[in-house]
């Protein structure tokens, strides 16, 4: 007997869970997923680093491997990626005007922002923030 097709929302949820296993960077697909992850991080006390990008922006694409490396290194930070053309509400709310833009958040509020592809500065603000706060590592559920 063939299994019934999954509803779109359930399928997206499963894809998101799979994405957590293969990548430490979570791609935000909608305003709701943005709210869910920010609420989760706020409730758990995790800082959030967000990469605002666009598929057509070469500096954004060039920063992807470095952002993945940061996500693997700093497991006490939740790393999110937002395509500004796909999830315009989030980009608008955080007043993102150029790509790439990186926003460090804590408690649901913006703590720091970097506009442009600057790997050294990005690592520096994460390290500085972690040294100030000392949060426990994120435990991803399977």
Image (cartoon, grey):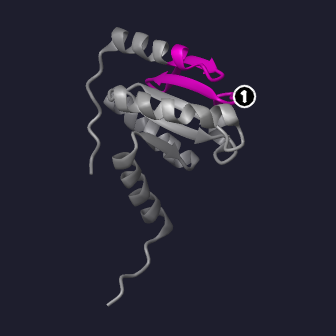
User: So how many labels did they put on this image?
Assistant: 1
Magenta stretch encompasses residue 101: yes
Picture coordinates of residue 127, whole percent (x, y): 40, 14
x then y, percent, for residue 116: 66, 22
Residue drawn at the location 58% of the way across and 40% of the way down: 82
Give, as a single range, the part of the protein colored magenta: 93-122
- Residue picked out by circle 1: 98
Q: Nearer the viewer, residue 81 or 13?
A: 81
**Left or right placement of residue 29 versus residue 41 in this view:** right
**Residue at x-position 38% and y-position 27%:** 77
- x and y percentages locating residue 58 in the rendered image: 69, 36
Q: Is residue 17 above or below residue 43?
A: below
* Whether residue 109 is situated above or below residue 53 in the rendered picture: above
> For this rendering, which residue is in front, 56 or 98?
56
The percent coordinates of residue 111 (x first, y second) are 52, 17
Residue 104 belongs to magenta span: yes
Give left or right: position of 75 versus 35: left
At x 44%, y 17%, the residue is 126
Q: Residue at x 36, y 87 (%)?
A: 2
């Amino acid at each position: 007997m063939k299994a019934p097709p999954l509803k779109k929302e359930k399928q997206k949820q499963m894809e998101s869970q799979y994405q957590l296993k293969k990548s430490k960077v979570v791609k935000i697909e909608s305003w709701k997923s943005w709210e869910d992850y920010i609420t989760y991080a706020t409730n758990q006390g995790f800082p959030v680093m967000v990469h605002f990008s666009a598929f057509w922006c070469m500096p954004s694409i060039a920063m992807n491997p470095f952002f993945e490396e940061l996500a693997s290194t700093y497991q006490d930070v939740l790393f999110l990626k937002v395509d500004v053309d796909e999830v315009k509400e989030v980009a608008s709310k955080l007043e993102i005007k150029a790509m790439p833009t990186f926003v460090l958040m804590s408690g649901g509020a913006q703590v720091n922002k970097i506009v442009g592809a600057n790997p050294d500065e990005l690592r520096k603000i994460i390290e500085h923030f972690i040294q100030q706060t000392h949060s426990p590592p994120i435990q991803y559920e399977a």
